[in-house]
Image: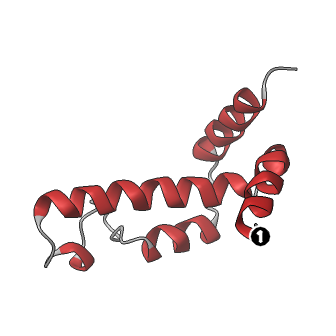
């Protein structure tokens, strides 16, 4: 069977190898500040201090990854815990 992390990792690798692009994740990445070229630092970060821009980009990567994983069936326990914490 494997752990939940193994299941999620397999699912992410399968999605990465797929020839079909999930546009919801693409839209989340664009909203997080990634540019169309995949370079990361777009116009959204031009006016920030470079060190702060790197920090913000890291936060955005974690946010997009977490949102993507939260849509997976394997993450329902995580989603329940985080949802309860947000309500509290």
Q: Nearer the viewer, residue 67 or 88?
A: 88
Image label count: 1
Q: Residue at x 43, y 55 (%)?
A: 61
Q: How is the image coloured?
A: secondary structure
Q: Position of residue 63 (x, y in %)?
A: 51, 60
Horizontal side of residue 44 vs 59, given as left or right: left
Q: Residue furthest front?
A: 88
Q: Position of residue 46 (x, y in %)?
A: 15, 76
Q: Quadrant of the N terminus?
A: top right
Q: Nearer the viewer, residue 78 or 45?
A: 78
Q: Residue at x 67, y 39 (%)?
A: 14
Q: Residue at x 65, y 46 (%)?
A: 15
Q: Position of residue 73 (x, y in %)?
A: 85, 50
Q: Quadrant of the C terminus?
A: bottom right
Residue on which the image places disc 1:
87
Q: Locate residue 4: give its quadrant.
A: top right
Location of residue 76 with respect to 86 vertically, above or below:
above
């Amino acid at each position: 069977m494997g752990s939940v992390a193994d299941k999620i990792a397999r699912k992410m690798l399968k999605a990465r190898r797929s020839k079909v692009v999930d546009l919801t994740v693409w839209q989340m990445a664009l909203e997080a500040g990634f540019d169309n070229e995949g370079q990361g630092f777009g116009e959204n970060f031009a006016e920030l201090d470079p060190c702060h821009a790197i920090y913000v980009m890291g936060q955005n990567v974690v946010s997009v990854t977490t949102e993507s994983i939260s849509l997976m069936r394997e993450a329902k326990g995580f989603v329940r815990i985080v949802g309860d914490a947000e309500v509290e």
